Amino acid sequence: MLLRHQLQKSEPLNYHVQSLDGGANADNRVLFPGALNSEFTNNLEFLRPSRNKAISTFRILDQYGHVLDKERGVDTTDEEALVLYQHMVSTGEEGISVGSASALNPTDPIFCQYREAGVFMQRGFTLDQFMAQLFSNTDDTGRGRNMPVHYGSRELHIRTVSSTLATQLPHAAGAAYALKLQNQQNPDVEPRVAVTYFGEGAASEGDFHAALNIAATRQAPCIFICRNNGYAISTPTSDQYRGDGIASRGAGYGIDTLRVDGNDIFAVRTATREARRLALTDGGKPVLIEMMAYRVGHHSTSDDSYAYRQKVEVEDWKRRDNPITRLRKWMEERDLWNEDKERELRSQLRKDVLAAFDRGEKKKKPKIRHAFDDVWENITDEQRAHIQELKDIVTRYPKEYDVSQYEGGLDSLDELLQKKG
Ligand SMILES: Cc1ncc(C[n+]2csc(CCOP(=O)(O)OP(=O)(O)O)c2C)c(N)n1
Ligand SMILES: [Mg+2]
């Protein structure tokens, strides 16, 4: 019995050794190294997941914005709700990104996919910063090297967006393991968790499995937030998996897991806060939250989703249930919001976005030298030859290669060439 007691609380690292001398127990369980605490049975019964009840979905508001459990209420003040609403007013899965980011600590490092602009908004990324990246202008911290929507901010503790699906997940698991060690070594510093966002399509990548497993075996404080929006571009979930969503996989890896109604920002906030608390208990552990949503927009501006789904399906979701109208209904019932305020907010936001668009568009492009630097501390002979060649071509064909829009024009290449190798 001592053995059982030890195993339940012990570090997983030791269990191989302990189980070898374990043997059969009085209550008919064998502690096989690969499946702890399994009971013997003489029933020949396969697990048949298709017959199980689906994992339930946590919500606080119904689709009409009514609080379901009056005693529990919501954990958001009226003032907070108004700010959240302003950050949400665009199109898509804002309940998930804005809601979860608002329930984290501002220094928790975040690793995004690409559909989480709300996380950036909530952390304080400005419209000018969004535009700097979208226009690849000289204020872009990524120095114009990335495709649009690959934002990142060191100050806001958000790693640069990674659209190579699922690569952000092992990064987050690794960061969480580093945080676990830091949290242990510096007990006076407020403990942190790593947080990562990904779509249900990204969960088909090998990196998803590697990340969940390493976070589970290392007990790293990582919150995995899956946005299950029903589609991976044109691939519906029915072609992506047969199991009970992504939540069932968390359980498979021994990770505390919850499925949440992603259209309910209050449920998202409560779930995230609780996930953070759980992730920091017992020295740290991963948590998975599957947030259910529907992708009402096209995948991207180059996608026409009506080629693979019915328009009526999309219209139905837009009308029936979405995170913005649900919060709005709740606010209207409390007399916090009305049609006039809505019109005013939308018109002001539109003006702000267009003004930032204008400013962003007018700025110069980053220096051309940034195409070469930040890889090696000193440029290599091969790079030197490439830079020289680029310079020659641009000088020979000035009409084809107008570099006047780039900060410093061609001179920035000279800065590099003059740098000592
Ligand atoms: C490794 C990799 N394979 C394929 C792609 C192309 N791709 C870009 S987005 C996407 C769909 C991802 O769907 P999901 O993870 O559900 O996110 P959603 O767009 O629905 O938010 C695919 C296949 C990619 N970016 N990276
Ligand atoms: Mg998806």
Image (tube, grey):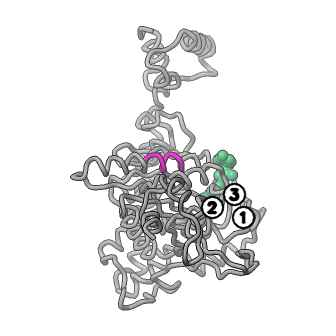
Residue 86 is drawn in which quadrant? bottom left
> Between tags 2 and 3, which lies in front?
2
Residue designated by label 1: 241
Mark 1, ligand 1, within 8 Å: the answer is no
Residue 120 is drawn in which quadrant? bottom left
> Between tags 1 and 3, which lies in front?
1
Residue at x 32% of width, y 47% of height: 182
Residue 233 marker: 3
At which x and y percent is residue 328?
A: 44, 79
> Magenta segment range?
169-175
Q: Are marks 1 and 3 in contact (CB under 8 Å)?
A: no
At which x and y percent is residue 345?
A: 40, 68
Q: CA distance from mark 1 to mark 3?
A: 15 Å
Give the overall secondary structure of the magenta segment. Answer: helix
Q: Secondary structure at mark 2?
A: loop
Residue type of the residue flagged with mark 2: Glu
Q: CA distance from mark 2 to mark 3?
A: 11 Å
At which x and y percent is residue 103?
A: 37, 66
Mark 3, ligand 1, within 8 Å: the answer is yes
Would you call the spot at circle 3 few (<14 residues within 10 Å), some (14-19), or many (20 or more)?
some
Q: CA distance from mark 2 to mark 1?
A: 9 Å
Residue 39 is drawn in which quadrant? bottom right
* Above/below status of 234 relative to 131: below
Q: Earlier in the sequence, mark 2 or mark 3?
A: 2
Q: Secondary structure at mark 1?
A: loop
Q: Are marks 2 and 1 in contact (CB under 8 Å)?
A: yes
Q: Earlier in the sequence, mark 1 or mark 3?
A: 3
At which x and y percent is residue 366?
A: 46, 30
Residue at x 43% of width, y 19% of height: 377
Residue designated by label 2: 200
